[in-house]
Image (cartoon, coloured by chain):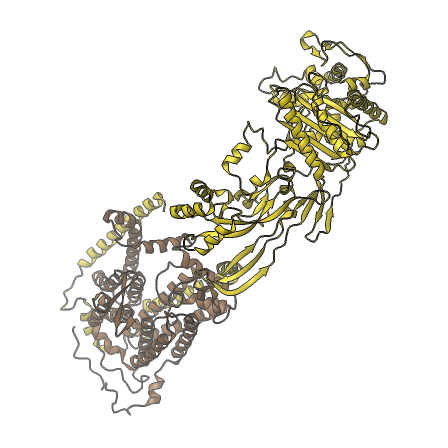
Amino acid sequence: MSPYLVTALIALSVFLLLLAAFFIVRYLLRNRRKKTVYRRSFVRADLDLVKDTEQIRGSGSLKERSGKQGRGRFYAFGVLMAAIFGTLSVRLWGLQILEHDKYVKLSSQNMTQRVNVPANRGRILDRYGNELVGNRPSITVTGKRTLAEDAGLVQRLSLVLGIPVGIVRRRILDDSEGVQADHTIASDVPMESIAYIREHPSLFKGVNVESRTVRFYPYGSLASHILGYTGPVTEDFLKGQPGDEPSPYMPGDIIGKDGAESRFEKILQGTRGYTDFEVDAFGRPTGEVLAEANSQSGDDVALTLDANLQRETDKILYDIIQLVRSDSDNKDCNAGALLCIDVEDGGILASSSYPTFFPSDLSRGISIELWEELTSVESDYPLTNRVVSGLYPAASTFKIFTSLAGLHHHMITDDTTSYCTGYWDAYGDEWGQRCWIHPGGHGTLDLEESINWSCDVFFYMLGAAFYEQWYALRDIPVNERPNPFQDYLATWGFGSRTGIDLPGEARGRIPTAEWKWDEFSDTPEEAMWQPGDMTNMVIGQGDLLVTPLQLCNAFCTFIREKEVTPHIFNHVLDSEGNVVVTYKAEEVVERPQYEPRHHDRVLEGCRRVVAREGGFSSIPVPVAGKTGTAEVAGKGDCSWFVGWAPVENPKYCAVCLIEQGGSGSLVAMNGVIQTFARIYGVDVGPITIWQNRNER
Amino acid sequence: MPVSPKIQSSPSNRSGSQGGFHIVAILRTLNYPIVVVSLILVAYGLLVVWSATLDSNVYSFNRQLSGVGVGIILMLVIWRLNYSRLSVFTYLFFGLCIFFIVLPLFPVIGLSVGGAQRWVVIFGQRFQPTELAKAFYILFAAALIARYKGRLTSGTEYLKCFALLCTPAVLVMMQPDLGTGVVLFVIGMVVLFAGGANRRWLITSVVAIAVLCVALIALDGVLDAAFGRDVFLKDYQKARLLVFINPDYDPDGAGYNLRQAQIAIGSGGLFGKGLGNATQSTLGFLPEHPTDFIFCVLAEEFGFMGSLGLIFLYAILMFLVLRVAFNSYDFFGTLIVTGVLGMWIFQIFENIGMNLGLMPSTGIPLPFMSYGTSAMLLNFVALGLVLSVWAHRSPIKSGVSQPGRRVQ
């Protein structure tokens, strides 16, 4: 009870007591006047009775009594009785008829106990049916967190399981599987230990031995970012969002936490089986089985990945990064991404992100230490899938799309050329910008050669042209002014998610004057849209950000001349191995617009890039591609390469990105060369890093 | 006790000159509707107790059955007694009442169960003497108030009567047996009410008692802290009150019984689960189901129709008893029957109300239904008194036995 209520009650009772005392005193005073003497008896009534002997026979009976008061009180009795029985009946009606269903439910909850049989989680396969994630049985020792209170028991467990006491205690107390659930103390316990625990139940009270199935990753960290990992369901997840259907999950259930495990959770999970026993109030089974259902295994999901190619790309990426680190004193280089897409249908054939992690480490609840290690700056965030979540300036690879924008908006015509002196200062010395070849210069270049040599000056001029077009409309407020350049780039998928069936995809960014104004609203002098913003964006720098997948997808759209959503889902197999569902591409309505003539000009540029670089000479089919070197503030340059093969009827498109890969895009080009070499089964020799080539 | 020597009427010995022992004439004095209805009730109660005690080794159905047997004999004996002779024994009843209330406190025979001195053990049999004290209390109250013949208007007299009537109730509460104490108090107030006590005095005393109760509850925590022990209310009693105010309070502890009772009743539905299928009670979710929570078993087994039938039977019985009170030969008889009526109605309301969550929980048995021989005996004694009042309502109808010398 709240203190206010108590105070109010005491005040009220004191008041009422005073009131009662007042009345009592008043009555006592009034009666004092009439006080008469009576004999012997405690009560005075006896005297009156004697006087009434004449009429005593039957005089007390209510029937004969004339006074209305006595009868009235008996009628009041009748009414009170009717009210009482009426109240009871109404309440009974409410409980037994109106709320019947509720109490039936409660009653069956009372007396049934459910033993759950978890369903086997479906496997994850590659496109050829190779098992990427499977299940294996694991004998697990579990216990409630209260076990930690028994120091002797913890000691015994430590001895039997061969785990230090401190770790046993920590695992018992670890709530990551849920406070109420049984906590895993040890997995894959040898049979001798299990036998000892089973033979000494009194020494190990409260310790359970369970045969669980755990996630099994035959290839270790292979494609870990795509596969994701599993873990015990969290309380927040169980609660769900308000308005959701009731969650089918229970504390202790294993669910997908990231990647395909999470994206295809509904397919993989399966349906848990159960047996309902009738129990008495003490939880003892009465022997009656009320209901039973078998568990239903989850279906297998086959991805578009090619496990062999994936293994190669993982290795290529690792090798390149290690080579950069060893050869060039570039110890900052420790991350990258390598992606290969099936151009025809958008299926991801291989997707590597480095640094990587082992999903098996995470699948049975993540310890705090491991989590801190995996999310620290020093570790370069191995849990991040750089292919879909990493944001980088697209650099020169972006020139393909800015070229198309220029062509589409007739900023570039058939006879547009630029003269490169290595330096461009159309907006005065203050705004002067260098071409990467500075000092020097490319001389006079047309569009194809500008793409081939990746000449910045050509594109600075294009950016300036778009800026002038935008600036000419300066009478219109910034937020209403058309941005034809950015809008055109957006039709290629930049600044929005590709819609790949993986969680955590980043949007990227196409900067506009309006965006800049909002972004730097605190410092208005920085918020103005300058020519430099446009000329930087046109070479894929500045505030532009893309993900490797976005870039690859845009290139795929360009080379297949059709937009397709990238995906990793291929098909679903039921437990008997029948294909139940296959991937079906959705029609994409909006497509980027360009004239075939323009497409061919840009493609020609890309063809010349590969021809000039020469690294693809061993690949049996013609290859085209584009290099890029992204300048990132405060860090070393990112190295990009996008390539595809064959040039006619393209089949494969690969993107390689090496973070802080040093100066020179050829670092990344190696990744694509090696990938295509594996695909076409040719030997291109070891990876070589060209030093000191300031090539873009 | 002043006994008037003037009041003398015709010979009162039963084997008098008017024809001796005519069984037919005697049987005519029986109030058959009451007998039939109460026997149906008893049979219904036995059926439910039987199903509730099927698997029990604590409760014995045979004991209950023997209680009913002895009760019926007692009832028949009392029916034949002329109640009006009893009015002279006012203070004897008072003394007997107090005696039975303090009986459990006596060393050898007293038995403490669950912290309360409520039981006595005689010849290895356990009894609750307070149940019998109720009968003497009714007789005492009726005899006391009948003296005023409905004209209890003097404040001093009222206060005296009130004090006398409250004494046993307060004693019982100190056992502690709050429930029975409240029953005695209710009987006392009902008899005062029917006895024609001044309305203002009645209201004043009820209000005063209510205020006292509220003050006790409010100050209980303070007093407990001051004395370092439970002074008035025990902790479990406070918890019960809290549960009554908020049914969701402590559902696994103090609120457990109420919650389980509601589940049992609610899951019964319209027609119930059938005899012996009361899973809630028989699987042990509801403790003390044959005694305080017998109504739950009934409601679960026979559903809404069964419970409504019980309430219907009770209603008929109560109105029949009211009729007896109305037609009594003298005021003493009226007040006896009124006292019995008040006791039953309050017990029915409190017990079923507690089962339904309408009243705070106390251990009050349901008349004719609950397991318990002492309570069953008392109910038959009370029934006997009612029948006696009916049988002796007039000299002609009372057959052989004339209402003899009545002293009021």
Rendered image quadrant of residue B347: bottom left
Up-down relation of residue A495 to residue A239 (above or below) = above
In this picture, residue B307 sits left or right of residue A382: left
Up-down relation of residue A71 to residue A434 (above or below) = below
The color chain B is rendered in? brown
Q: Is residue B379 visible?
A: yes
Observer-nearest of A692 and B65: A692
Q: Report the label total.
A: 0
Observer-nearest of A626 and B79: A626
Up-down relation of residue B7 to residue A471 (above or below) = below
**Percent position of residue B21, x then y:** 29, 90
Rendered image quadrant of residue A30: bottom left
In this picture, residue A610 sits left or right of residue B11: right
Q: Is residue A506 visible?
A: no
**Percent position of residue B344, x then y:** 35, 69
**Percent position of residue A137, x then y:** 58, 50
Q: Residue furthest top?
A: A429
Quadrant in the picture for the C terminus of chain A = top right
**Percent position of residue A665, x then y:** 71, 21
x 77%, y 12%: residue = A442
Observer-nearest of B275 and A319: A319
In this picture, residue B58 sits left or right of residue A522: left
Observer-nearest of A236 and A639: A639
In this picture, residue A589 sits left or right of residue B55: right
Chain rendered yellow: A
